[in-house]
Amino acid sequence: MLHQDQVDSNKISIKLTSLVILTFLILQGGTALSLFCRFVSRCDPYLYPFLEYPMYSSAKKEGSIVSKLTIFGILEDSSEVSITNKDLKIPDYNLSPYWFRRYYLPAIRRKKDKMINEFVDIYQKQYNQKLIGIRLEKQSFVISKEGVKLQDKTTEYIEF
């Protein structure tokens, strides 16, 4: 037999657990619908671990074109080095794969000077090599029943 105080504590714990679950569902729903982020472009990573889920809304189907972007830094001696988020490990900067794909790659594609300068400064501080430009290579693929088919490759140069 349960005592009255055990029954009361069970009811309280059930209500508290339900409240926590309801709070999490509201935060996740609000983040997914961008209700909390009217003044910034994206909710995530500010409301981590509650994230928008673009992976679900952008599923790739047959006939979809997928692009792979690769960044190459052009050094003073005209040689080139591939630059990925793994190459840039500076604790003061948020260079997770997420930040790299979400912020730096689009900024470089759109030639946003401020973000490009920040990216170049991070590289130059880490490797003590001066970059005189960036080469952005875009390789496209098409998804088909037979597999992934290679499409055209484009290259853009950004000089400083």
Image (cartoon, grey):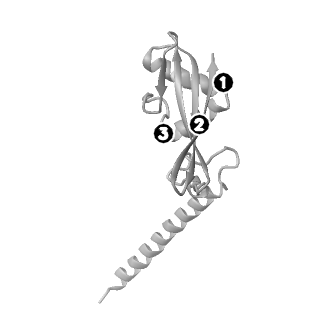
Three-letter amino acid code of the residue under disc 1:
Asp
Residue at the spot 58% in from the left edge and 63% down from the top edge: 26
Residue at the spot 36% in from the left edge and 85% down from the top edge: 4
Dot 3 surroundings within 10 Å: few (below 14), some, or many (20 or more)? few
Q: Label for residue 103?
A: 2
Q: CA distance from mark 1 to mark 3?
A: 21 Å
Q: Which quarter of the rendered picture does the N terminus lie within? A: bottom left
Q: CA distance from mark 2 to mark 3?
A: 10 Å
Local secondary structure at mark 1: helix
Three-letter amino acid code of the residue under disc 3:
Pro
Local secondary structure at mark 3: helix
Residue 52 in view here: no
Q: Pointer 3: what residue?
A: 97
Q: Pointer 1: what residue?
A: 113
Q: Residue furthest bottom?
A: 1
Q: Label for residue 47?
A: none
The vertical placement of 30 against 110, above or below, is: below
Q: Which quarter of the rendered picture does the C terminus lie within? A: top right
* Residue 11 sits in quarter: bottom left
User: Of marks 2 and 1, which one's residue comes earlier in the chain?
Assistant: 2
Dot 2 surroundings within 10 Å: few (below 14), some, or many (20 or more)? few
User: Of marks 2 and 3, which one's residue comes earlier in the chain?
Assistant: 3
Residue at the spot 45% in from the left edge and 14% down from the top edge: 128
Local secondary structure at mark 2: helix
Q: Residue furthest right?
A: 38
* Residue 86 sits in quarter: top left
* Residue 87 sits in quarter: top left
User: Of marks 1 and 3, which one's residue comes earlier in the chain?
Assistant: 3
Residue 62 pos. (x, y %): 59, 57
Residue 10 pos. (x, y %): 39, 78
